[in-house]
């Protein structure tokens, strides 16, 4: 994760001091965290856990396991699920667990691969792709109020030049959308009971 991408995620979690990073990879979200923030990571690959531990408090965990996440209810100010839900057999279960472990005033920021065949199936580990509507519905059904859904993708130089904020408006134009939309990003808050 480039610093500009990490800043984009952190900008949607303003004020979050305790964050859960699902599928944390090498812990880049924690590497670029604001001062005072604590990031807990979940990663399936034990070899990657060691390198992620330099930036996050990480543990090995299989999100496709039927067991609940290894955290108490309302443990986190925010949960990040970047590019992980499309790899899971039951992503709705993970989204419900995200809801359980986030505080009532917390937030979720998630990224899911778009439904387009060349995006979904270019990675053989993907189980499914999502439309904006299906991603929104999955979060709503799990007890989230989806605040916003937008398109994201790797438009050349935007991360390097720290212009990530320009990506969603640019992808609103059909030619750019077709060329570069690779995922949908969701911002969600716990629904009021």
Image (cartoon, rainbow, N blue to C red):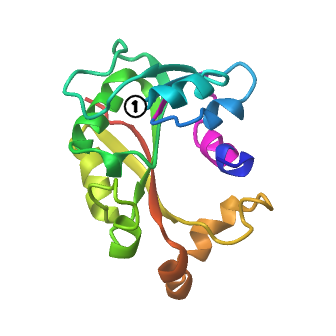
- Classify residue 162 as left or right of residue 166: right
Quadrant of the frame with the C terminus: top left
Task: Residue 122: name its quadrant.
Answer: bottom left
Residue farthest along the right direction in this orientation: 161
Q: Mark 1 = which residue?
A: 44
Up-down relation of residue 164 to residue 68 (above or below) = below
Up-down relation of residue 15 to residue 83 (above or below) = above
Q: Residue at x 29, y 28 (%)?
A: 97
Task: Residue 176: name its quadrant.
Answer: bottom right
- How many marks the image carries: the answer is 1
- Classify residue 38 as left or right of residue 94: right
Q: Position of residue 173 (x, y in %)?
A: 54, 83
**Mark 1, other Cα within 10 Å: few <14 / some 14–19 / many ≥20:** some
Front-most of 54 and 173?
54
Front-most of 117 and 91?
117
Q: Position of residue 48 (x, y in %)?
A: 53, 31
- Classify residue 46 as left or right of residue 35: left
Can residue 19 be seen? Answer: no
Magenta stretch holds residue 15:
yes
Magenta stretch holds residue 72:
no
Q: Position of residue 71 (x, y in %)?
A: 37, 14
Q: Position of residue 74 (x, y in %)?
A: 39, 17
- Classify residue 182 as left or right of residue 7: left
What span is colored magenta in the figure?
A: 7-22
Up-down relation of residue 105 to residue 74 (above or below) = below
Residue farthest along the bottom direction in this orientation: 175
Residue farthest along the top direction in this orientation: 72
Can residue 108 be seen? Answer: yes
Q: Residue at x 59, y 35 (%)?
A: 26
Helix, strand or loop at disc 1? loop
Front-most of 97 and 172?
97
């Amino acid at each position: 994760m480039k610093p500009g991408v990490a800043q984009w995620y952190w900008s949607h979690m303003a004020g979050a001091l305790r964050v859960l990073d699902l599928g944390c990879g090498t812990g880049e979200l924690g590497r670029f965290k604001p001062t005072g923030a604590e990031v807990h990571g979940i990663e399936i690959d034990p070899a990657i856990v060691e390198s992620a531990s330099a930036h996050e408090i990480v543990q090995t965990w299989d999100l496709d396991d039927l067991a609940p996440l290894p955290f108490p209810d309302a443990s986190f100010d925010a949960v990040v699920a970047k590019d992980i839900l499309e790899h899971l057999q039951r992503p709705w279960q993970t989204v419900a667990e995200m809801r359980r472990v986030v505080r009532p005033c917390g937030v979720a920021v998630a990224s899911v691969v778009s439904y387009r065949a060349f995006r979904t199936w270019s990675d053989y580990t993907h189980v499914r792709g999502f439309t904006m509507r299906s991603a929104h519905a999955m979060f709503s059904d799990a007890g989230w109020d989806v605040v916003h859904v937008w398109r994201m993708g790797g438009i050349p130089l935007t991360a390097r030049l720290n212009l990530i904020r320009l990506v969603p408006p640019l992808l609103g134009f059909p030619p750019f959308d077709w060329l570069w939309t690779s995922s949908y990003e969701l911002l969600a808050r716990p629904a009021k009971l």
